[in-house]
Image: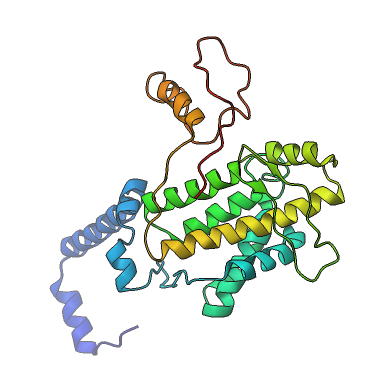
Amino acid sequence: MIDYPINCRRTTVNTLSRRQILGSLGLTVGASLLTGCGGNLQSSEQHEKAAPTDQDRKGGTKRDHLGHDWQYIQLAPDFIAAEAYRLMPEGGCMYGLFAGIMTAMAKNRGEPFLSFPLHMMKYGVGGVGLWGSLCGALNGGAAIIGLFERTKERRENLIAQLFSWYEAAELPTYRPNKTKDSEPIPVSVAGSVLCHVSAGKWCETSGSDVGSPEMNERCRRLTAEVAAKTVELLNANLKEPYKLVGLTAEVKSCLSCHSKDLHDTMGKMQCGSCHQQLSKKHPTVPASTPAPHY
């Protein structure tokens, strides 16, 4: 509290009329309400436009409203893969990937990475709480990309690169070092970003049961491999933005009608992994056409 001289306080009270005081209070309250509403009314697109541009990225660091610096620095994919493999048993695939990258950032940068509540990423295990939806490793990779890339187009392209690679690649090929379980294991092509489909196809290929030690090892190695790929993409993004090569022939064919004419669907994931029984009106497109490799 400011200690005004006594004569100053007395002059202020005597000079201002009751109407002037109430009027000033009304203006203050009104301005406060407008300011509060203005923040809530700002659209997500306006937030996107306010994100740092390429020039901002080169000229300085990105900070949140508390002044925290969330700038990405180049990391070694092999090291991150090993960290994700090590941490995955503590909280699942999404946690292992996210924690592996964030702990590496914390060692290099300190705060705010040291204080991030990593435990929240445990929800992604088994395709979000064992619901078999989005693969937890991909969920964690997209979260990392979203943390470090605030430009909408670049962020979506990076996620598209990661997801398209996952759909088409033979995974997992990662082999942990200095462990008794470092021998190669069976690989499979998911053809989908869904945990339910991805894990199911691997179990079918390997002859292993869902929830078996063999499948757990597969998911652990898969987490490591997706973590390494995420870091590779972010490292390249420091130099120049990725340009999406394109969607698969299958997805393009589906979206040419369902997205442009029928307006009854959205998405970029391969369609054939789920929609296998189609009417005769549909064009002949090989199901699960491999996505281009990047």
Please state which of residues 192 and 126 is positioned toward the viewer in this rendering.
192
Position of residue 211 in the picture relative to residue 294 (left or right): right
Color style of the picture: rainbow
Position of residue 6 relative to residue 276, above or below, is below
* Residue drawn at (62%, 42%) of the image: 134
Asked which quadrant contains residue 57, the reply is bottom left
* Residue drawn at (50%, 42%) of the image: 292
Q: Position of residue 123 (x, y in %)?
A: 67, 51
Position of residue 276 relative to residue 235, above or below, is above
Q: Position of residue 92 (x, y in %)?
A: 72, 55
Please state which of residues 162 and 103 is positioned toward the viewer in this rendering.
162
- The answer to whether residue 173 of the structure is visible from this angle is yes
Position of residue 198 in the picture relative to residue 213 (left or right): left
Q: Residue furthest left?
A: 15
Q: Position of residue 205 (x, y in %)?
A: 78, 38
Position of residue 8 relative to residue 144, above or below, is below
* Residue drawn at (38%, 57%) of the image: 241
Position of residue 128 in the picture relative to residue 159 (left or right): right
Q: How many marks?
A: 0
Asked which quadrant contains residue 110, the reply is bottom right
Position of residue 108 relative to residue 230, above or below, is below
Q: Position of residue 176 (x, y in %)?
A: 75, 64
Q: Residue furthest bottom?
A: 5
* Residue drawn at (54%, 9%) of the image: 280
- The answer to whether residue 92 of the structure is visible from this angle is no
Please state which of residues 74 and 117 is positioned toward the viewer in this rendering.
74
Quadrant position of the N terminus in the picture: bottom left
Asked which quadrant contains residue 269, the reply is top right
